[in-house]
Image (cartoon, helix red, strand yellow):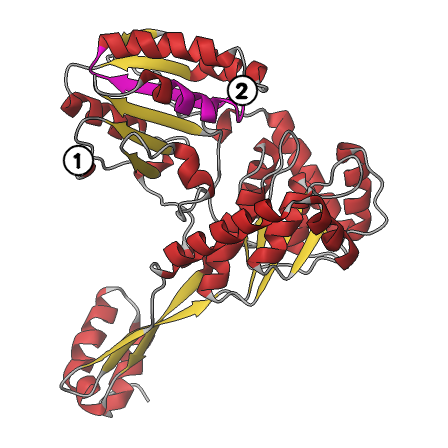
Amino acid sequence: MRIERATNLNSLKRNIDQDSEAQLKAVKSILTQVREQGDAALYELTEKFDKVLLSELEVTEKEIEQAYSEVDDEMIAIIKEAAKNIEDYHVQQKKQSWFITKEDGTLLGQKVTPLDSVGVYVPGGTAAYPSSVLMGVVPAKVAGVGRIVLVSPPGKDGKLPAGVLVAARESGISAIYKAGGAQAIGALAYGTETIQKVDKIVGPGNVYVALAKREVFGTVDIDMIAGPSEIAVLADETANPVYVAADLLSQAEHDPRAAAVLVTTSEELANQVAEQVELQLKTLPRQEIARESIETYGAIYLVDSLSQGVDVINEIAPEHLEVMTEHPMELLGKIKHAGAIFLGPNSSEPVGDYFAGSNHVLPTSGTARFSSPLNVDDFTKKSSVIMYSESAIEENAKKIAAFARLEGLEAHARAVEKRLGESEHE
C-alpha cells in the first residue's frame, strides 16, 4: 500500500455517474423490456445474463426444505441468533405516532404508517449473502411492513444459495423470486404476472442494479444508490498492525473497486500495516480481487495528530470507520461523517456485517455526509395530522389569508375567510 502525507487525499468518491453511457443504455433497455413483457422478459434475461433456463420464478417450499438440509444445524442457529440481534437493535429505532393539543382545542400530530410492500434485493454472483437478507428484511418486519418479497439471481443450477433461503425463511419473508440484475429491479417497480409491484426497493447490488434503482426512483422509493464498499481505519501507535491489515482486506475482497484506507499518526504503524497487508494477501482465496482494490483504491495517510486524522475522516465520510486508538470514545463526538463507527480493537468491521445487530446497508461514496444506514424509518412514512378548533380558526384566519394573498393565492385566502362568514366574494 502506498504511504503518503494526508495533504492531497485520494477521495473514496467513485460516483455512479462515472459509469459508462453504455451501461445506462443497457439498463434502460432492460427496464423497458420488463415493463412491456413481464414474466417473459424475466425468463429471457435470466437465460441471457445468468445462463440458466428457469421453469418458474418463485422459489418453492420444496427448495426451501432442501436448503435446510444443506445447512448444518449450528449455522442455522447462528443465523437465528443474528436475526434476533438485528431485531433487538432495530426495535430501538421504531417511532410512534404522536399528538398534541393546544389550549384553544387545536390538535396537531404525526401518524406513522408502515409501507404496504417492500422488495429486498440480495446480490449473487461472486458470493452468497444471507446477511443481506437479514439486513433488508428484519427492519422491514419491525416497522410492520405487510408484504416483503425477496429477489436474487439464481446460480447455474437454477437455485438460490441454501444460506440465502434459510435466512429468508428465518426472517419471515413473504415470497422469494429467482431474478437478479436490472430486470429484477424492473419487476419490483412495474410488476409482472408473477411478481407484484412493491412500494420500495432496498438492498445493494452491482452497477446495473444501482443504475436501475436510480431509474425507477419516483415510480417506487429506494433506499440509496450504493457504490463499492469502503473502509477507513483511524489509528494511533497503540493499534495492532495485524488487526488493521486484516480489517482493510475484509473490505478489499468485496470488489476490485472497493476502497481501504488507513489514517494514522504513527509512521511505524503505517509501515507495519503495509507489510502485513502484503503478507496476508498471499493466502486470501479472493487475492486477485483484494489486490486490485488495494493497489487502486488503497492508501495509508500520515497525519500529525488525531485531531487532523478526524478531519481527514470527516472529509472522506467512509461507509465503515474503525477507530483503533488508545481512547476511541474520546473521538466519537468529533466524528461527523461515517456510515458505521466501530470503536476499539475488538470491533472488527465484520462484527457489524453479520452479528452485532446494526445494519450493514450503509451510505457509500461520501454520501455518509448526508445519509444514514438502512433503518426502520426507511420502511415507514409519516402523515401530518391537523384538526383546528373553531376558536383557533377564528383567531388565525385573517393571518392565514394575509399570508395567502402575499403569495398571490386568492382562493387560499377566501377558503379560510369562508369560515368567518366575512368573504366579500360569494
Q: Return the residue nearer the eye: 218 or 56.
A: 56
Q: Is residue 124 left or right of residue 369?
A: right
Q: Is residue 105 left or right of residue 2?
A: left
Residue at coordinates 35% horizontally, 43% vertically from top-left?
A: 371
User: From this viewpoint, is residue 397 visible?
Assistant: yes
Residue 34 horizontal/vertical position (percent): 73, 47
Numbered label attached to residue 256: 2
Residue 241 horizontal/vertical position (percent): 32, 16
Image position of 378 with respect to 156: above or below = below
Residue 246: say if magenta: yes
Q: Amino acid at mark 1?
A: Lys
The local secondary structure at tag 2 comes to loop
Numbered label attached to residue 334: 1
Q: Which corner quadrant holds the N terminus?
A: top left
Q: Quadrant of residue 51?
A: top right
Residue at coordinates 80% horizontally, 38% vertically from top-left?
A: 157
Query: What is the magenta range?
Result: 245-266
Residue 54 horizontal/vertical position (percent): 83, 45
Residue at coordinates 43% horizontally, 69% vertically from top-left?
A: 113
Q: Residues within 10 Å of mark 1 (few under 14, many from 20)?
A: few
Give the spatial CA distance, label 1 vs label 2. Answer: 31 Å
